[in-house]
């Protein structure tokens, strides 16, 4: 309690409040730029925090982390170019809503769902950090393999209308994840003598290409067509009916995001993908998903923001990063002479509560910016395409290059854009490819580690209760669509006989 009161006193300082506000605004702006994620921003900002007080430095990075997660949804909705990886799933329905003239409604819902998810994650972090950290600590390679396998089982229903095409896309994504050096054997795979490919294909250039690049080519092919722009409809905000429809989805995604974010190295991207899939799975009418269903915006946004606070649990309590950005925050703690771990809760309670308050204030602040500024953001859709998309393409190229300062990443982005454009023509979705790429490395790495631990005895997977639980859920998730299809076929046959 003394630590909480000390943190409250610290936040009466206008300087600290200003730091959190600057971090929030910077996170929203950086997150909205394709490819320039909050991870990159915190990495660039870290050297400038060395001369700051530890509380102010960590508060700044934490605020940027929270706001950057939401900021990625802005361009995901407006121009189908996710500003950050966790916003990739938001584009599935957010961009179709913007095309239909409901950009303001999608942005408003993204802001509200993000705030709810973010505040929920902070509350989870404050109340249940010790207990939840012990649960996450029980996860080893076998558990991660089972979790990733469960994620891959969702590919059939994650987007699009063809389960077969989704599975093909997911398999292609897993194949992309195998490019690079196999760290178990030390053998380069599919690198064709290019040493830069030894580290594998990074997620961000592929994501930028599949979304922004493909959409750029699609819009370029339609420049000669006349489109009617509904400026009035574009600035409509969500209604109470919209909130009522999304309430269950947001609540479900908060739980999903908090659980997935708690697992070390998972982060908001996987949480958003699962949140979107579960929103679609629980919907009675699934036909609107991928075509502009507002629940497809609320689900991933609540999930990826709920993962932010939860990802700080293993970072602070165990010294194990919960995501890429928290890995940088972990580095900031070490640079400032703070050693994460159980002792941090007893030795630095003021710092911990200051982090909690900074994240809470940041979530509330970007909610105000996002909701109140939804009308302003929606005006971006009124910019002529011949001016808007070249600017987006330039930002996308900068974002792809800035990750590793590699021209190869820019070429990967361009090739991914061409591939995405062709795949769209044949009815393939980008979502399964991205999810396969995200989970492919985790599946392969955790499987190899598990087999080494088990001395290649496959049956020992069944000795782990958590693994068995995930495997049962995976089988159930695969069986439900099959039974649903059989039931629908039986009903059609009965109707024909009648």
Image (tube, rainbow, N blue to C red):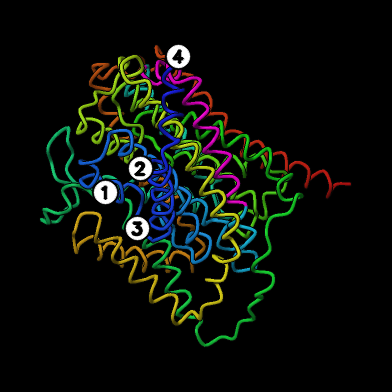
Q: Nearer the viewer, residue 33 or 290?
A: 33
Circle 2/circle 1 CB separation < 8 Å: yes
Task: State yes or no: residue 126 in magenta.
Answer: yes
The span picked out in magenta is: 109-137
Question: From what the image shows, is residue 317 above or below residue 71?
Answer: above
**Element class at badge 1:** helix
The residue singled out by tag 4 in the image is 465
Query: Could you say where residue 262 lies in the image, as x and y percent from the top left?
Result: 43, 28
Which of the 4 image quarters holds residue 265?
Answer: top left
**Element class at badge 2:** helix
Q: CA distance from mark 2 to mark 1?
A: 9 Å
Question: From what the image shows, is residue 369 above or below residue 332?
Answer: below
Mark earlier in primary sequence (2, 4): 2
Task: State yes or no: residue 148 in magenta.
Answer: no
**Element class at badge 4:** helix
Q: Give the mark toward the camera: 1 or 4.
A: 1
The residue that appears at 26% across and 45% down in the rendered structure is 178
The residue singled out by tag 3 in the image is 35
Left or right: residue 161 compared with residue 387: right
Q: Nearer the viewer, residue 67 or 472?
A: 67
Helix, strand or loop: magenta stretch: helix
Q: In the rendering, which numbered label is found on residue 45? A: 1
Q: Give the mark toward the camera: 3 or 1.
A: 1
**Element class at badge 3:** loop
């Amino acid at each position: 309690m003394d630590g909480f009161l000390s943190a409250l006193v610290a936040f009466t300082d206008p300087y600290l409040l200003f730091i959190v506000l600057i971090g929030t605004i910077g996170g929203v702006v950086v997150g909205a730029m394709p490819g320039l994620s909050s991870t990159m921003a915190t990495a660039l900002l870290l050297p400038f925090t060395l001369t700051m007080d530890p509380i102010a430095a960590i508060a700044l990075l934490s605020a940027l982390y929270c706001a950057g997660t939401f900021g990625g949804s802005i361009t995901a909705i407006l121009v189908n170019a996710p500003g950050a990886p966790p916003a990739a799933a938001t584009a599935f329905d957010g961009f179709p809503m913007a095309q239909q003239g409901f950009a303001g409604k999608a942005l408003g819902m993204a802001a509200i769902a993000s705030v709810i998810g973010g505040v929920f994650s902070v509350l989870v972090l404050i109340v249940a950090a010790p207990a939840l950290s012990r649960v996450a600590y029980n996860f080893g390679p076998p558990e991660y393999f089972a979790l990733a396998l469960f994620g891959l089982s969702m590919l059939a229903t994650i987007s699009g209308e063809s389960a077969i095409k989704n599975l093909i896309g997911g398999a292609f994504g897993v194949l992309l994840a195998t490019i690079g050096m196999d760290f178990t054997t030390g053998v380069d795979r599919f690198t064709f003598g290019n040493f830069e490919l030894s580290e594998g294909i990074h997620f961000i250039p592929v994501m930028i290409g599949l979304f922004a690049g493909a959409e750029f080519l699609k819009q370029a092919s339609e420049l000669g067509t006349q489109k009617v722009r509904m400026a009035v409809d574009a600035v409509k905000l969500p209604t109470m009916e919209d909130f009522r429809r999304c309430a269950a989805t947001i609540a479900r995604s908060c739980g999903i995001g908090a659980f997935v974010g708690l697992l070390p190295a998972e982060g908001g991207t996987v949480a958003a993908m699962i949140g979107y899939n579960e929103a679609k799975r629980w919907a009675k009418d699934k036909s609107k998903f991928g075509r502009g269903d507002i629940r497809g915006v609320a689900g991933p946004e609540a999930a990826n923001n709920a993962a932010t606070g939860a990802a700080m649990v293993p970072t602070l309590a165990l010294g194990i990063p919960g995501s890429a950005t928290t890995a940088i925050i972990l580095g900031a703690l070490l640079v400032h002479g703070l050693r994460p771990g159980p002792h941090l809760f007893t030795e630095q309670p003021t710092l911990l509560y200051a982090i909690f308050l900074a994240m809470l204030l940041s979530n509330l602040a970007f909610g105000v910016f996002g909701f109140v500024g939804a009308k302003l953001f929606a005006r971006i859709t009124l910019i002529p395409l011949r001016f808007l998309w070249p600017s987006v393409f330039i930002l996308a190229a900068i974002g792809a290059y800035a990750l590793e300062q590699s021209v190869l990443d820019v070429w990967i982005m361009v090739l991914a854009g061409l591939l995405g454009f062709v795949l769209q023509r044949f009815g393939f979705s980008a979502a399964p490819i991205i999810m396969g790429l995200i989970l492919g490395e985790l599946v392969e790495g955790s499987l190899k580690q598990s087999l080494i631990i088990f001395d290649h005895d496959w049956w020992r997977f069944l000795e782990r209760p958590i693994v068995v639980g995930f495997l049962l859920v995976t089988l159930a998730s695969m069986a439900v669509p099959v039974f649903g299809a059989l039931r629908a076929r039986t009903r059609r046959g009965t109707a024909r006989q009648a």
